[in-house]
Image: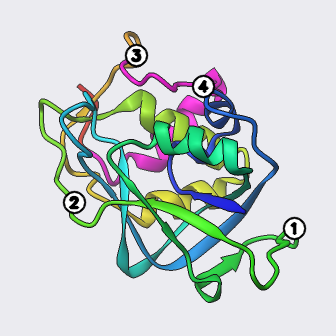
Amino acid sequence: MYIFGYGSLINNHSRQLTGQTGKAIPAVIQGLQRYWGKVDGSYKIAPLVARIGEGHCNGVLVAVDDITLQEFDRREKGYHRVRVNLDSIVCVSDECILEEGETVWVYVKDKTEVPCKHQPIVQTYVDTVLAGCLSISESFAKTFVETTHGWHHPLENDRHNPKYGNLAGVLDEHLYTIDRLIEQVRLPLK
């Protein structure tokens, strides 16, 4: 079975903080929309959330077993896991190995709540996700930025004092590209 990761799970280093997974396969899900939003009061930041609906969302398909799925269920508290219709998945590369009868899960929220100054988008979360996207391609990262809603909400630059607990895999050479990719869609860094 697979998990479709559309945020920090795109980043291999961040995924490995939770559990061992198979190779990540770039894909797009039609009918899934990604937002910056709040999950619940236990989160100090506004992570990415997705809901079933219009649009499309790029991310990665990651092979997991039953035990690893339980580990990711704990990591993704506040979300609920739903099964994805295989017909809505478009693979971005020739590596796609989905077969009829495979199970693909995605973590969603039915209702999105917008980030605020008490639960803002934080730069280290953005950096982690986009470093994962850049490991696939700059074009993949650009698609991520363009298909994510809510960049105008409060964003806190926490690069010097990280608030995101799964910060991983972000190299200094990523930062310029990340800043360039999001400069047109976000509030200026504070």
Kindly identify which residue carries mark 2: 112
What whole-number distance in Å separates the C-alpha atoms at marks 4 and 2? 26 Å
What whole-number distance in Å separates the C-alpha atoms at marks 4 and 1? 25 Å
Q: Secondary structure at mark 1?
A: loop
| Sooner in the amino-acid sequence: mark 3 or mark 1 | 1
**Residue positioned 35% across, 53% down in the render:** 184
* Residue 37 to residue 55: above or below: above
Q: Give amino acid for label 3.
A: Pro
Kindly identify which residue carries mark 4: 168
What whole-number distance in Å separates the C-alpha atoms at marks 3 and 2? 24 Å
Q: Which residues are magenta?
A: 162-186
For the N terminus, the quadrant is bottom right
Kindly identify which residue carries mark 3: 162
The quarter of the picture where residue 123 lies is top left
Q: Position of residue 85 (x, y in %)?
A: 57, 83
Kindly identify which residue carries mark 1: 95
What whole-number distance in Å separates the C-alpha atoms at marks 3 and 1? 34 Å
**Residue positioned 65% across, 24% down in the render:** 171
